[in-house]
Image (spheres, helix red, strand yellow):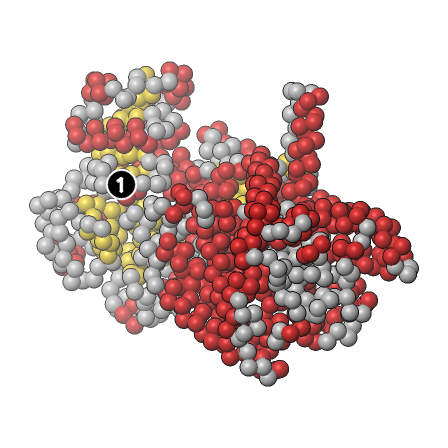
Amino acid sequence: MNYSAIRKILGNVLEFEALFLLLPCIVALIYREHQGIWYLACAAVCLVIGRIMASLPARRDVFYAREGFVAVALSWIVLSIFGAAPFVLCGDIPSFTDALFETISGFTTTGSSILVDVEALSRTSLFWRSFTHWVGGMGVIVFILAVMPKTGGYNMHLMRAESPGPSVGKLVPKIRETAMTLYMIYFGITVVELLLLIIARMPVFDAFCIAFGSAGTGGFGVLADSCASYSLLCQGIITVFIILFGVNFNAYYFLLMSKDKKAAFQMTEVRAYFGIIAFCVITIGINIRGQYENIFLAFHHAAFQVGSVITTTGFATQDFNLWPQYSRALLVLIMFIGACAGSTGGGMKVSRVLILFKVIGREIERYIHPRSVRSIKMDGKACDPEMVRGVCTYLGTYMMVFALSVLSLTMIESCDLETIFTSVVATFNNIGPGLNMVGPSANFAFFSPVSKYILMFDMLAGRLELYPMLLLFAPGIWRKS
Amino acid sequence: MKIIVVGCGKVGASITAQLAGHGHDIAVIDHNSSVIEEITNSYDVMGLVGNGASYSMQKEAGVEEADLLIAVTNSDEQNMLCCLVARKAGGCSTIARVRNPVYSSEIGFLKEELGLSLVVNPEEAGAREAARLIRMPSAIQVEKFAKGHVHLIKALIPSGSPISGMALSDISRKLQADVLICTVERGRDIEIPNGQYVLQEGDTISIVASPENVRKFLVRIGLDYKPVKDTMIIGGGRISYYLAKRLLQDGTRVKIIEKDLQRCEELSELLPTATIIHADASSEDVLIEEGIETCGSFVTLTGMDEENIFLSLFAQSCSKAKVITKVDKIAFDEVIRHFKLGSILHPKKIIADTITRYVRAMQNSIGSNVESLYHIMEDRVEALEFSIHEDAPVVGIPLADLKLKKNVLVACIYRSGSIIIPNGQSVIEVGDSVIVVTKEQGFEDIRDILL
């Protein structure tokens, strides 16, 4: 382990967190809230510690995959701890466990909240809470890679550890330009959404927070009823954009910057993603039509909820906990699928699910023709067998972590299984709300601190796609070499 | 520049390493996903898995905007096809590695018809370098500038040499040979010395001079200067063939030891005047029987680095021959240089240098072109030759008045047939070839020597 290289990366992360913490200070200035002082203080502390950690010389700058994984996992933990500090200090969320839960939920773009009354929070804290979604959506490390000058090839280990999807590639030869391109697309679409929301007469502060929440596919709202009290037009805009943010960003790259525009529409994953959404919206719309005055409204709410859940955002306009069983079950199922790889969404990712289905197909064929040879293809190209193997192991690990989390929560908590099951589904897949006691109109406040830490681990593991977090517990990793 | 490298073997990887270090946008294509993963992990390049000759693959790598495609897969035919496709698809410059002797002899035609900008042949380049070393056995490395009119050689100062203890500023006067000492390697340090620097026994020096002055200098510092009469080559691969052909033309006797009978027969057909021995050279008896103790030079060119190194160590211990060792695996440089292996031949590095020179020359087709580029002194020093055009900001100013970067030396000026070893009053003129020695990497234009 090259500890000094990891220390330097953590230092950089803290320096950038200091930068991010300045934004809520501006909000505090505008609304004349005294909480801003604490954010400024935290920014100063982050800057000092970060500068010291980053400027001490490293023994060696080169690092390998395991350092990359560990550095990313630790970065997210450090980021969350320092991000939680101002909530506690300014008194908005007095308990540290709760503040940490809220911050991790923010950075991992989950959107599960422990707040009983959201509207009681200061504007400064509300803004910071939503802004963590935006930072966490595309990733802090990716952001650092985009702005830091000249980086070596080994930084690919960092990008790979943080970016979601079964295989992480580059859009352009240089890692810095790739990261920059991703952030430009991300920033651009966020700005468009923000402007549209403001034009649609959403209050400016809400528009900022909702735009951050949907861009990072997070789901923290600023009102107690999430998005229910916004106009139908605003809800429609949010629906469109959360679905757009769940698309693989490579598609936008092809569409906006590459000559090969057709490639964007030919991506199997993106097609499957829209296919799943269409299927869910239509069947749920029909299923819930009796509860609404007209069919348009039924489809409007079906589309919002489906988009919000499949992209793992977690905004709500309706309490889907009150919907018929079929709709509830389907929503829980698509929580597992999640958005496309290379998007800001969580879950297992559509591409993994596609590969899994193809593997199942191949296995069935093997029973019929034991000597048949078939390679798994995506977008007309054969997948690397290593990648296919990785997807299968991912599913296994995923199920294992999931089962263990559910089991340990049932040991601690006394509530019903549906609540526990969906609370793990909602945090592990970075969605936000689950069913029953953790439904869209409820919150996670009633869990005991131990359960909260388990759920925090699930959120981080889900966002970083398991292995970086699991690696922290592998005994071999900490050995000096 | 946007560059596509097809084939990520040893040559591909070392070119990628050099070019990525200079900040080019590089896409690497190889059909083997594990080598692609390795290269993208160590360098900031984009890796693609697939067939580099396919149009759709090249398009994915961005051939339409690319400036250069370098095809270095292990198949000549595929390399040429890659270049042809790239030429038609993107209109970029192309470099192909072609090493089959059958194609090498027709290279002019192929280059013209396929629109290749440059054809590289590592085996031939390696053979050329080995032949140069055999002609000048007391040098460790010999490089040519200004179409062969200026030599840069690397040599070890022998014990008891009159040059040890001498300051650099006295050397030309005392030895009556017009030479310039560019770099000195002492222990682990490599320096570009000034006039006060005092040489010692055991220093490795590099000098620039005309071929006659090099010869005079070597004799006067106590090194032999006699071309060898005979050569023993171990291994009968392509380099051996090219080398033997060159040496036989010069009238050197050549003996090749090869263990594959069929290859021996092929070689004896191709090289009727060479002595071909069918034997396994890893046996001490065979080598002694074939006269290792008395041969003038001994070249190990088998496909195994380890075997080459052992054979060379043995040759150093039992004979006075000039020893040349081929080493292909680029790693472990540090270890290898502590062995007494004579001159080390790195065919892949020679090619990487040639391609790097081409890329740098491409980048400034208007300015002063890089005509030659060599890495000397364990790759820590670059020696470059620039041809000076009108707009260069160094023209017409005495060197003493130019503000040069640290560790940059103007080593030689070649002006219409005459060689000038420059001093402070020397002036660079339009049309000159200027040789610059520097510890910095990545010079593209003569103006890069200025602060």
User: In which image quadrant can residue B229 be found?
Assistant: top left
Q: Is residue B300 left or right of residue A353?
A: left
Give the image location of residue B130, x and y in percent: 31, 36
Q: Chain of mark 1?
A: B
Q: Residue at x 21, y 62 (%)?
A: B194
Quarter of the image with the C terminus of chain B is bottom left
Q: Secondary structure at mark 1?
A: helix
Identify which amino acid the numbered label 1 is placed on. Answer: Val
Q: Is residue B283 left or right of residue B317?
A: right
Q: Is residue A20 left or right of residue A209?
A: left
Give the image location of residue A186, x and y in percent: 64, 62
Looking at the rendered structure, the number of numbered marks drawn on it comes to 1
Give the image location of residue A35, x and y in percent: 55, 78
**Pick the front one: B2 or A447:** A447
User: In which image quadrant can residue A134 be found?
Assistant: bottom right
Q: Residue at x 57, y 41 (%)?
A: A400
Q: Residue at x 38, y 27 (%)?
A: B237
Q: Which residue is disc 1 drawn over?
A: B335
Q: Is residue B410 above or below residue B62?
A: below
User: In which image quadrant can residue A36 be found?
Assistant: bottom right
Q: Is residue A38 left or right of residue A190?
A: left
In the current view of this chain or complex, which residue is farthest to the front?
A: A414
**Pick the front one: A27 or A458:** A458
Q: Residue at x 35, y 58 (%)?
A: A58
Q: Mark 1 packing: few (<14 Cα in 10 Å), some, or many (20+)?
A: few
User: Can residue A377 be seen?
Assistant: no
**Pick the front one: B346 or A400:** A400
**Pick the front one: A260 or B341:** A260
In the current view of this chain or complex, which residue is farthest to the right?
A: A294
User: Can residue B351 be seen?
Assistant: yes
Give the image location of residue B446, x and y in percent: 39, 62
